[in-house]
Amino acid sequence: MSDNEKLSMIRHSMAHVMAQAVLELFPGTKIAIGPSIENGFYYDFDLPRPLTDADLETITEKMKEIIASGVPFERKEVSRAEAKALFSDQPYKLELIDAIPEGETVSIYTQGSFTDLCRGPHVESTKKLHADAFKLLSIAGAYWRGNEKNPMLTRIYGTAWTNPKELRLYLDYLADIEKRDHRKLGKELDLFSLHEEAGPGLVYWHPRGARIRQAIEDFWRSEHYKNGYELVYTPHVGRSWLWETSGHLGFYKESMYPPMEMDKSDYYVKPMNCPFHIMIYKNTKHSYREFPFRWAELGTVYRYEKAGALHGLMRVRGFTQDDAHLFVTPDQMDDEIIEVLRFSMFMLHSFGFEDIHAYISTRPEHSVGDPEKWEAATAALKKAVEKEGLKYDIDEGGGAFYGPKIDLKVKDAIGREWQLSTVQFDFNLPERFDLTFVDKDGTEKRPYMIHRALLGSLERFFGVLIEHYAGAFPPWLSPDQIAIIPVGENAYDYSKALEKRLKAEGFRVVTDLSSDRMNAKIRNAQKMKTPYMLIIGEKEMADDLVSVRYRGGKQVNGMKTADFIAEVHKTIDSKEQL
RNA sequence: GCCAAAGUAGCUCAGUGGUAGAGCAGCUCACUCGUAAUGAGCAGGUCGCGGGUUCAAUUCCCAUCUUUGGCUCCA
């Protein structure tokens, strides 16, 4: 048996123990399901009253008693009728029994006073569980069988491991996640804010956050020009005609901000940029000779996200997509996709993401467009990921109704996966807007249209970056790259002159002229995770030197200022982390 | 949208049926200091917003907004 199977058995058994504890503490509770999941387990209950965090303690104590009692887990196969009789007062279990396909065995597991309908397997006895290697983590709501039409049950999440050391490691990992939380760091580093009174899900980029965004955007724009893109700008609102034609008013209306009426027309704030880029395309008749078109825009869009779905920078109502639309002829498709993917990988690598996984989604049941085109497009996507040597999974039928796609997910510094890039074919909009070009033979043909975003949205990407770097950005992205710290007042003028000199090099520099002690200034710069701190006093002033304190704590005293400048240039230009 | 919890000073948080408190940040003054917090003082809050109960509500109740953890959703 693999370690994973063993762990999942422990977790599943732990879920049963928890259910027993809950039933003993809260008689009358209806139990639903309780599987093992990644890192732990949960069980869904229909409880006589809501639970509090204090209840988790009580349940934990009860679970420890059950574990200590060392009762065996006993499997028994029963008939459907027996099972129904056993669970006659458990409506969710009855529903589950009815869902078991005819002819499949129905098994139950019993430990102590608790019997559950369960396929198993379980550990032999609660002796095999470790009373100090589990922890109940949270109480949450969850729909019965995941359907929002069904009643909402109370879910208790827990984590369980083979020994206390593993549990501690996992809890440390959770603490690390908390430390990296972009909402917390966003406040501490003064990067951005959200204002409930001014509208939820709308992001305010503070100067320090804006510097990072500026660095990202500058890089993004110059790379797009280098890679054969043109940049465009389009409006933020459009008349209903645009959204009727695109079809968004038909299938996406509930996610759009409501219309504004003006001159007897309805105007909508854009939830996406594509129809606008299409208007540019339609402005003139196109020849195959002009192809391909690659139009990119940092386009700000607004979407109505359900209140409960909002989450820091990760899920917002207004955001800027690093969007581009490619219009290509059928014979350019393969090469273009390869290029997009290569470009995408380059961008992600530039931001320190090395571990990248691709997901290709193919044609769903309900789709628009010629199946042959779907085939060709999907083949182009596969060819591209293979050419790039990317690991990939295929999500059969997981594409949007309008075309197949590749999503790229990156692993961050602590192994969490984030979806960033997406490349999607669109067989819907060219049809709806009747896009054409004149081919070699003089006939009008339909171009292929490809949507792509490399970073996803700047807001979300920013959130991911904050968590990836835990706020300690590589120098090329740091809001302040260098903090000058004069030792005493006599070094103030010199420090100001040095600041000017470093700024002339293009560096982002601050000088701390506050009345704080030098130690406090170092502490403050360190807390802001500034990569370079320059300590300036008599010695440095005398010989045009700097004493460098690096963010990591390393010190190099008496460095020639010119050498320091060269070193910082090198680190910034190479986009290295410090 | 659903279940649950929370909302007190700029931040982190304490507290109470009798109109609020700490630390940090801010401001003022003194100190000018050699690698993660100098000291003293001052100022700062309709206790999320609306309603109800009460002699009295920040505290109890209802409603609402927002946030958090999940669920659903993410074309």
Image: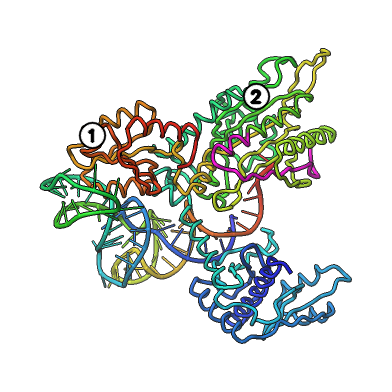
Splitting the image into 4 quarters, where does residue A476 fall?
top left
Residue at horizontal 18 percent and vertical 39 percent from the top? A489
Residue A16 in view: yes
Query: Where does label 2 land, which residue?
Result: A294
Q: Which chain does the residue under circle 1 lie in?
A: A
Q: What's under tag 2, amino acid-wise?
A: Arg
Q: Nearer the viewer, mark 2 or mark 1?
A: 1
Query: Where does label 1 land, which residue?
Result: A541
Residue A33 in view: no
Q: Which chain does the residue under circle 2 lie in?
A: A
Q: Mark number for residue A477?
A: none
Image height of B65 relative to A457, above or below: below
Q: What's under tag 1, amino acid-wise?
A: Met
Image height of B11 relative to A569, above or below: below
Q: Which residues, given as a range, are shown in magenta?
A: A344-367
Splitting the image into 4 quarters, where does residue B24 fall?
bottom left
Q: Secondary structure at mark 2?
A: strand
Q: Is residue A506 magenta?
A: no
